[in-house]
């Protein structure tokens, strides 16, 4: 045991001495090839135009730096980096204000992920507001029913007659609306829907053929946006 103490002390001393971190001895680059080599915290895009296979020395930082600065027949340019953004995802809300997100990453020219610090310029935003419009409540009417009843939007010679089961509109309330397809009343917007019944025609009178009357029925809905 006593004989082992000097040997242990020797190995402890060696382990505490400063040392150089070694990488691969070299990287082989065939003629006409272009590769990216990243060693010792430095990255270069190496293009071999020498007409022969080249071995790029990278065992130590000094060898790697010397090659990048004095490459003969080989182009060694600093690697390029750029921000890459993904597609925006779905909004978290359909109305009233939500958010949507996307991926944002710094990538090397060969598509390898890299630290944000390697990319220049401001990092693109990864979230934004969406669907900021007000939320709307929409209610379709029951529609006209054979024999009368139900809810409908009737335009007779430019005059609008509304027949609703909705309590805050009086049954058979008439207002002049012309060609308009919507109007506001009591915090709701009433919307004219598709035509589903046309009773236009000539009205009979005592003289025989009467005047032409435009009389059309439409579906109707209402909505309120908070």
Image (cartoon, rainbow, N blue to C red):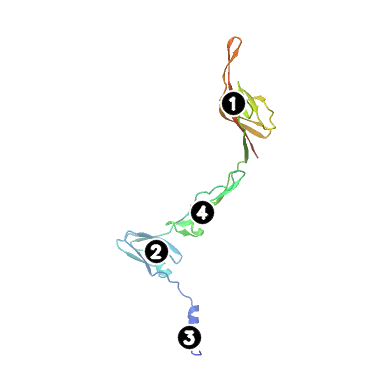
- In 3D space, how far apart are the residues under numbered discs 3 and 2 (Cα atoms)? 42 Å
- In 3D space, how far apart are the residues under numbered discs 2 and 1 (Cα atoms)? 82 Å
- In 3D space, how far apart are the residues under numbered discs 4 and 2 (Cα atoms)? 31 Å
Where does the image place residue 133, in percent across and percent down from the top left? Answer: 60, 41
In this view of the protein, can residue 7 be seen by the observer? Answer: yes
Q: Which residue is mark 1?
A: 217
User: Counting other residues with Cα less than 10 Å from the Cα at mark 2, is it few (<14), some (14-19), or many (20 or more)?
Assistant: many
Tell me: residue 154, above or below residue 98.
Answer: above
Q: Nearer the viewer, residue 171 or 48?
A: 171
Contact between labelled residues 3 and 1, with CB atoms less than 8 Å apart = no
Q: Earlier in the sequence, mark 1 or mark 4?
A: 4
Tag of residue 68: 2
User: Counting other residues with Cα less than 10 Å from the Cα at mark 4, is it few (<14), some (14-19), or many (20 or more)?
Assistant: some
In terms of image quadrants, where is residue 70?
bottom left
Q: Residue furthest top?
A: 207
Q: Is 44 left or right of 129, judged from the image as shown?
A: left
Q: Which residue is mark 3?
A: 7
Secondary element type, mark 1:
strand
In terms of image quadrants, where is residue 160?
top right
In this rendering, the label closer to the viewer, 1 or 3: 1
Q: Nearer the viewer, residue 63 or 202?
A: 202
The quadrant in which the C terminus is found is top right
């Amino acid at each position: 045991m006593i004989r082992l103490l000097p040997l242990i002390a020797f190995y402890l001393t060696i382990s505490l001495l400063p040392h150089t971190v070694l990488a691969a001895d070299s990287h082989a680059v065939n003629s006409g090839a272009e590769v990216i080599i990243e060693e010792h915290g430095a990255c270069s895009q190496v293009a071999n135009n020498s007409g022969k296979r080249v071995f790029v020395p990278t065992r130590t930082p000094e060898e790697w730096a010397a090659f990048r600065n004095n490459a003969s027949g080989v182009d060694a340019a600093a690697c390029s980096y750029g921000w890459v953004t993904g597609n925006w995802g779905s909004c978290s809300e359909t109305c009233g204000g939500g958010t949507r997100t996307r991926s944002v990453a710094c990538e090397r020219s060969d598509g390898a992920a890299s630290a944000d610090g390697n990319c220049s310029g401001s990092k693109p935003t990864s979230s934004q507001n969406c669907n900021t419009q007000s939320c709307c409540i929409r209610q379709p009417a029951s529609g006209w029913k054979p024999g009368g009843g139900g809810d409908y939007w009737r335009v007779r010679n430019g005059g609008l007659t509304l027949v609703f089961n909705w309590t805050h509109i009086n049954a058979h309330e008439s207002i002049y609306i012309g060609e308009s397809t919507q109007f506001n009343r009591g915090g709701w917007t009433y919307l004219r829907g598709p035509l589903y019944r046309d009773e236009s025609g000539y009205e009979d009178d005592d003289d025989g053929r009467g005047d032409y009357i435009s009389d059309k029925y439409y579906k109707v809905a209402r909505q309120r946006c908070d």
